[in-house]
Image (cartoon, rainbow, N blue to C red):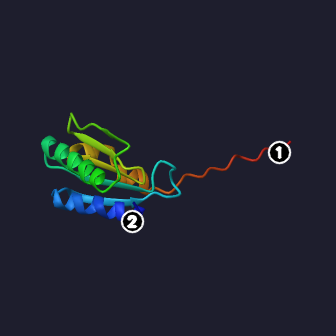
Amino acid sequence: MQLETLRQLVVDTLADMKARDVEVMDVRGKTAITDYMVVASGTSDRHVKSIAETLAYRAKEAGEAPLGMEGVTEGEWALVDLNGVVVHIMLPKVRDFYNLERLWSAPALVTKAAATNH
């Protein structure tokens, strides 16, 4: 499946499942883990679980089975790894605490070593 088609499948599924505050971040060049990081909120632990399970089902149905899923049994934070798109679905309080949007939107830190005079 094309990367952009997969990203759109994720966005459409999140919209269908009434996920809130969906943010899609292009993280190419910032990490080798994935190309897109998607963060969304669910209204309850049951909602978070349902969104993650539905997303995994639809992706598999489209020929893109998840590489892994985490946190679905607890429901406070679920992760669905679709390789080119990694999706985090969280309760609002958990999302506020981790603030992944700030983490992934921050510019890369570049430091210069102090020149030493010999």
From the top left corner, tell me how far across and down residue 8 is, in percent.
31, 64
Of residues 32 and 114, which is closer to you in this image? 32
Q: CA distance from mark 1 to mark 2?
A: 51 Å
Quarter of the image holding residue 2?
A: bottom left
Vertical placement of residue 97 versus 102, above or below: above
- Residue 117 is tagged as 1
Vertical placement of residue 109 versus 15, above or below: above
Element type where label 2 sits in the image = helix
Vertical placement of residue 113 versus 16, above or below: above
- Neighbourhood count class around disc 2 (C-alpha, 10 Å): few under 14, some 14–19, many 20 upward: few
Q: Considering only order in the chain, which callout, 2 or 1, is on the residue closer to the N terminus?
A: 2
From the top left corner, tell me how far across and down residue 84 is, in percent.
42, 54
From the top left corner, tell me how far across and down residue 45 is, in percent.
15, 41
Q: Is residue 17 left or right of residue 114?
A: left
Q: Which residue is at 22% across, 51% downward?
A: 41
Vertical placement of residue 56 versus 8, above or below: above
Of residues 59 and 12, which is closer to you in this image? 59
Residue at which label 2 appears: 4
Q: Which three-letter amino acid code belongs to the residue tagged 2?
A: Glu
Residue lying farthest to the right in this orientation: 118
Q: Which residue is at 35% across, 60% downward?
A: 6
Q: Which three-letter amino acid code belongs to the residue tagged 1?
A: Asn
